[in-house]
Image (cartoon, rainbow, N blue to C red):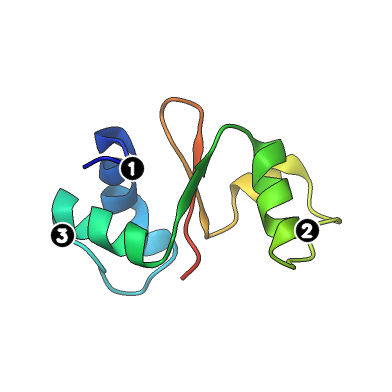
């Protein structure tokens, strides 16, 4: 487990239902493989979340910080970072 911290993987496992109807991973290893496959990214702030979406063509201009944080693709991590998973 190199790219994603254990905290990140555990958060994704716990909250994956906010993005997917059915579980896509049940173990840390499966979670890491899934996140690597879909090229999920970890960023340090909501400003970086906004930047990520803008760079990938999403129209987030009218979204405030709370709306960004509540987007189904955005997982707030306990350490203050954000995991972005595009399903």
Q: Measured from the top left, where is residue 43 in percent x and y?
A: 55, 39
Within 10 Å of disc 1 (Cα), the crowding (few <14, some 14-19, many 20+) is: few
Cα separation, mark 2 vs mark 3, equals 31 Å
Q: Secondary structure at mark 3?
A: loop
Tell whether 30 sits left or right of 44: left
Q: Measured from the top left, where is residue 77 in percent x and y?
A: 43, 35
Could you say which quadrant of the image residue 27 lies in?
bottom left
Q: Residue at x 33, y 42 (%)?
A: 4
Q: Which residue of the protein is positioned furthest toward the front in this rendering?
A: 2
- Contact between labelled residues 3 and 2, with CB atoms less than 8 Å apart: no
Q: Secondary structure at mark 1?
A: loop
Q: Nearer the viewer, mark 1 or mark 2?
A: 1
Task: Say above or below: 59 vs 50.
Answer: below
**Which one is earlier in the sequence, the residue at label 3 or at label 1?**
1
**Which one is earlier in the sequence, the residue at label 1 or at label 2?**
1
Task: Say above or below: 48 vs 41.
Answer: above
Q: Residue at x 44, y 65 (%)?
A: 19
Q: Nearer the viewer, mark 3 or mark 1?
A: 1
Q: Measured from the top left, where is residue 52 in percent x and y?
A: 66, 52
Q: Measured from the top left, where is residue 14 in percent x and y?
A: 28, 49
Tell whether 50 sits left or right of 40: right
Tell whether 12 sits left or right of 60: left
Q: Residue 3: which numbered mark, if any?
A: 1
Cα separation, mark 1 vs mark 2, equals 27 Å
Whether residue 72 is visible here, answered yes or no, is yes
Determine which residue is flagged by label 3: 26
**Which one is earlier in the sequence, the residue at label 2 or at label 3?**
3
Determine which residue is flagged by label 2: 60
Whether residue 67 is visible here, answered yes or no, is no
Within 10 Å of disc 2 (Cα), the crowding (few <14, some 14-19, many 20+) is: some
């Amino acid at each position: 487990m190199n790219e994603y911290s254990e905290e990140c993987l555990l958060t994704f496992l716990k909250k994956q239902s906010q993005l997917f109807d059915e579980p896509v991973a049940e173990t840390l290893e499966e979670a890491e493989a899934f996140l690597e496959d879909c090229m999920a990214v970890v960023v340090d702030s909501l400003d970086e979340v906004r930047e990520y979406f803008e760079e990938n063509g999403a129209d987030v201009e009218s979204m405030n910080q709370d709306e960004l944080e509540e987007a189904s693709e955005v997982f707030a991590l306990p350490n203050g970072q954000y995991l972005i998973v595009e399903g």
